[in-house]
Amino acid sequence: MTSPYDDRVLALAGLAQALQQVRRIAETGQSETGAARPVLDSVFRIDADSTAQIYGGVRTLEPGLRVLADYLGSRGDDPMLPRLAWATIQLERRFTGEPNTLAAVANGIAAIAPQAEEHDSTHPEVLAALGGLYADTISHLRPRIMVQGNPHYLGQPGVVSEIRALLLAAVRSALLWRQLGGHPWQFLLARRAMMEAVGGQLR
C-alpha cells in the first residue's frame, strides 16, 4: 500500500542530500560526486514520470534517505543540517512568491541545460554557471542561507560555486516537496508516517 509520504520523503531526501554535500564541501573543500550528481541533475529535470526519476532513481538518494532517517529518529550528528534545511524551506516559500525571480531562474536553467548535457552536471563550468545563477537570483531573497565552514575553502571561487549550485538543487527539492503536499507541521504530526516511508524506500 502506497503512502502520500513515499514521494514526499524522496524530495526531502534530495534536500538533505544536497545540503549534506554543502556541509561536506564547506568543511573539506570537496564533495562526493556520486551523491552530488543526482541532486544537481534534478535541477534540469523539470518534467519526469515520477519523483524518483527526477533524481535518476531511488537508489541515487540513499545518502539523503539515510540522513533523513537519522534526523527523524533523533540520531543526526550535525546540528547545522536541520538549520540549513529549515532555512531552505523558508527561502523556497519566498522564492515561489517572486514571479520575476522564478522566471529568471527557469530561463537560466534552460540556458545552462545544453552545457550540462554535453559535459555533466558536476563539471566545473556547469557548477560555475549554476552558482552564478543562484547568486544573481535566489541569493538576494530573505532569509539568506548562511553556510559555515572552513574559511580556507569558503574563500575559493570553485568551492563557492559548487555550494551555490547545490543550494539551488536544495531549493528545487524543497519546491518539489511542497508541490507533493509537504508542510512543516508534518515533521511534528506525521513523523512516524515519514519514518515508515523512509524505511520503505531504503528496503
Image (spheres, grey):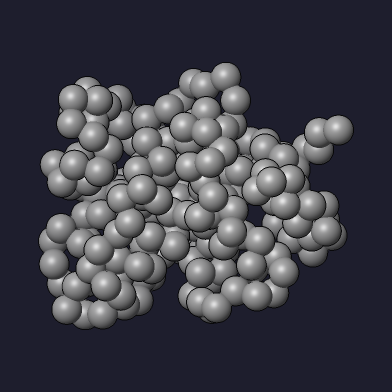
Extreme front residue here? 203
Above or below for 16 versus 37: below
Q: Position of residue 5 (x, y in %)?
A: 75, 43
Q: Is residue 97 visible?
A: no
Report x, y in % for residue 185: 77, 58
**Foreground pick, 14 / 106:** 14
Tell me if 156 is positioned left or right of 15 in this view.
left
Where residue 17 appears, x then y in whole percent? Answer: 47, 54
Residue positioned 44% across, 60% down in the render: 19
Residue 140, percent across and down?
A: 34, 55
Count of picture labels:
0
Q: Is the residue 8 above or below the residue 158 in the image? A: above
- Relative placement, left or right, of 170 versus 3 is left
Is residue 147 toward the left or the right of residue 4 in the image?
left
User: Is residue 155 visible to us here?
Assistant: yes
Name the residue located 21 percent from the left edge and 55 percent from the top edge: 161
Determine the image quadrant of residue 105.
top left
The residue under the point 79% across, 52% down is: 196
State the quadrant of the N terminus. top right
Quarter holding residue 31 = bottom left
Q: Residue at x 57, y 19 (%)?
A: 49
Residue 99 position by quadrant: top left
